Amino acid sequence: MEWIAGDHSTPISNVLRRERSVLVAQALDSLPEHYRDVLIMREFQNQSLEQVARQLGGTPEGVRKIWARAIVKIRRMLKDVE
C-alpha cells in the first residue's frame, strides 16, 4: 500500500528543504577553500580520510583535523542563520 500513499512531501516542506540547501551552499562557499574541499570530499563524495589526503597531498590525520574544524565552523554558521 506504500505506493498509494506516495511521497509525503508537502509544498512547504519542499520549500524549506530548498531554503536549507541554499543556506548550506552559502555557508560552504564562505569557508576557507581547504575546509570547503575537505567537507565536500568527505560529506558529499563519501571519500575516506586517506583518499582525501592523497588528493590534497596531506596526511589522513591532517585531513581529519581540518574536517573536524570545518564541521564546527559550518555548524556555527548554520546555527547563527537559524
Image: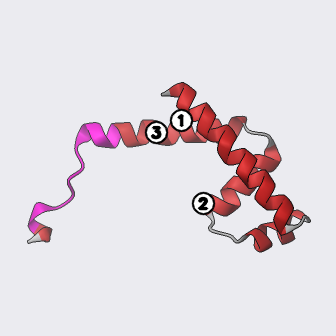
Q: Which residues are magenta?
A: 4-15
Q: Amino acid at mark 3?
A: Arg
Q: Which residue is mark 2?
A: 44
Q: Position of residue 69 (x, y in %)?
A: 74, 46
> Circle 2: is it few (<14), some (14-19), or many (20+) Cα within 10 Å?
few
The residue at the point 69 percent across, 38 percent down is: 73
Q: Quadrant of residue 57?
A: bottom right
For the residues bearing labels 1 and 3, Cβ distance under 8 angstroms: yes
- Which residue is found at the position 46% from the left and 39% from the top? 20
Q: Residue at position x 62%, y 68% from top?
A: 46
Q: Is residue 29 left or right of residue 9?
A: right
The image position of residue 16, as x and y in percent, is 36, 37
Q: Is residue 33 left or right of residue 21?
A: right
Q: Secondary structure at mark 1?
A: helix
Disc 2 or 3, which lies upstream in sequence? Answer: 3
Identity, as a three-letter code, of the amino acid under mark 2? Phe
Per the image, the residue denoted by label 1 is 23
Q: Disc 2 and disc 1: Cα gap in Å?
A: 16 Å
Quadrant including the N terminus: bottom left
Q: Marks 1 and 3, how far apart in space?
A: 5 Å
Horizontal side, residue 18 vs residue 80: left or right = left
Circle 3 crowding by C-alpha within 10 Å: few under 14, some 14–19, many from 20: some
Horizontal and vertical percent position of residue 37: 75, 53
Q: Nearer the viewer, residue 26 or 38?
A: 38
37 in the magenta segment = no
- Please give the label number shown on residue 20: 3
